[in-house]
């Protein structure tokens, strides 16, 4: 449902914009739009496993190099 804001008698354009912004904030439209815009796609189970294995391998390699004194 779109919001409608009509200019009232003897109302300045600045106050009209202020009233419009206030109405948008109260309605929650802006929050919903931001949630939809920045929503991240869920990663597949296999992709999560691969990244976990990759992190584990990197950690082991780092610890090995640290023991050898190369870091």
Image (tube, grey):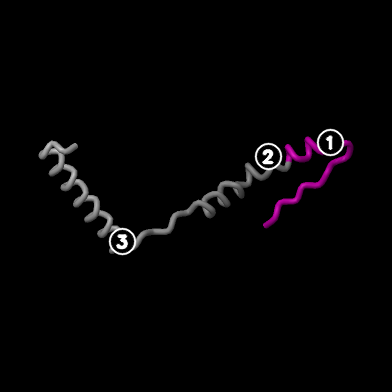
Please state the horizontal and vertical placement of residue 56, each as a whole percent of the image: 20, 50
Which quadrant is home to the N terminus?
bottom right
- Lateral position of residue 8 relative to residue 39, left or right: right
Residue that lies at the very extreme toward the left in this rendered image: 68
Please state the horizontal and vertical placement of residue 25, each as a whole percent of the image: 63, 42
Residue ID for mark 2: 22
Q: Which residue is more in the foreground, 16 or 68?
A: 68
Q: Are marks 2 and 1 in contact (CB under 8 Å)?
A: no
Residue ID for mark 3: 47
Please state the horizontal and vertical placement of residue 71, each as a whole percent of the image: 19, 37
Which region shows up in magenta?
1-19
- Lateral position of residue 2 relative to residue 46, left or right: right
Magenta region, main secondary structure: loop
Residue 71 located within the stretch drawn in magenta: no
Q: Earlier in the sequence, mark 2 or mark 1?
A: 1
The image quarter containing residue 54 is bottom left
Q: Looking at the image, which residue is at 39% across and 59% down? A: 42
Residue 9 located within the stretch drawn in magenta: yes
Q: Looking at the image, which residue is at 58% across and 52% down? A: 33
Q: Is mark 3 on a helix, strand or loop?
A: helix
């Amino acid at each position: 449902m779109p919001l409608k804001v009509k200019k009232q008698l003897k109302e300045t354009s600045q106050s009209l914009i202020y009233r419009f912004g206030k109405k948008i904030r109260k309605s929650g439209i802006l929050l919903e739009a931001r949630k939809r815009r920045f929503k991240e796609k869920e990663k597949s189970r296999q992709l999560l496993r691969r990244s976990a294995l990759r992190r584990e391998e990197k950690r082991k390699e780092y610890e090995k190099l640290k023991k050898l004194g190369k870091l």
